[in-house]
Image (spheres, rainbow, N blue to C red):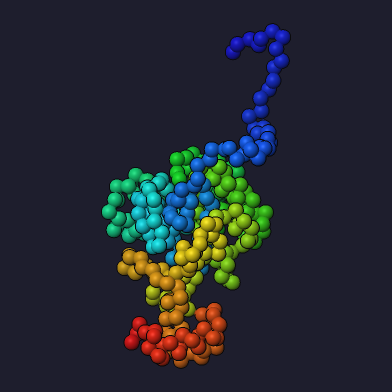
Amino acid sequence: MTDPIPGAIQVAIDLEAPVPLCPLGLSEFLRLDIPPRRNLLSPILAEKSINMLFGPRSCGKAQLGVGMAVAVATGTRFLRWEAETPRRVLYIDGEMPGAALIERFKAATAGVANFRLAEINLSILASDLRPDGLPDLSTAEGQARFAPCLEGFDLIIVDNISTLCRTGKENEADSWSALQGWALGQRRAGGSVLFLHHAGKGGDQRGTSRREDIMDTVIKLSRPADYKATEGARMIVEFTKARGLMGNDAEAFEAQLKDDTWAERSASNARDEGIVALHMEGMSQRDIAKDVGTSLGTVNRVIKAYKAGAITDDND
């Protein structure tokens, strides 16, 4: 250690001291050279974004999340969305049995032509494969333990909030503060986050609505009116918040995973076929409207169109 310079004032540097606030004048602010954000999965997931996908239990959230992860890692298309270029993805799972998670990733990558990119760019951190599980992401200690694992990833998928963020009560806004700070920190560092979450009894995301304040994209999954348990992962995909999405990109659609292959179609077509199916089962138009969540006039119009032959019944 060198001796201090005679007469010099010795200043202790506090490495934990906050960075001084320094507002920018408008001209200086407008001259900032900040490149525009590109999309990780166009048009719904952007660079440096915070996002959420939520839906009821066992509706296919994890399958959808895995499909999105594989598409971003390999630079390929998934449902209506397309990755512009391969990116590094970390999938953090706090719920699934290890064997089941392996099967899901095997199924999701089985038909991918550039599988080598998935091997290079996609990593999985699974609670079930660790004797002590995964740390609590909603605590400072837990976040510190996760930190070394997160460097270099463009997208971090957190599956799911309730199993990986265990401190506080879901319906209290203050319980979200620590995780919100963590997510904003990932964004400042150049990464994006996609949270997977459960829906409550009313169909909205479970717990405090404050979560959605910082989100760029919020995707809601719900069951089609004519859904049967034997159909597995079949869902309506809609956007309850979508910065920058317009026109067809923002429209809801139906997605279904069948025989390890995803298919999608217009939500309005799916709704109309559901109305017809319920009509064929003998349900009254008023009950159909209530069950489907649409107006009695819409139900009446769809049934008239069906009787006129403009809509076909898949079971015919």
**The N terminus, quarter of image:** top right
x, y percent for residue 97? 42, 58
Task: Name the outermost residue toward the front.
Answer: 27
Observer-nearest residue: 77 or 7? 77
- Mark yes or no: residue 146 visible: no
In this orientation, which residue lies closer to the viewer: 52 or 136? 52
Instruction: Measuring from the top left, give residue 190's x and y in whole percent.
Output: 51, 42
Q: Residue at x 66, y 25 (%)?
A: 13
Picture quarter containing residue 276? Answer: bottom left
Residue 81: quadrant of the picture = bottom left
Query: Image height check: is 31 above or below 272?
Result: above
Q: Is residue 63 above or below residue 153?
A: below
Please state if 279 lies on the left or on the right of 20 as rendered. Answer: left
Q: Residue at x 57, y 38 (%)?
A: 32
Q: Nearer the viewer, residue 266 or 219?
A: 266
Nearer-the-camera pick, 284 or 151: 284
Position of 316 relative to 250 (above/below): below
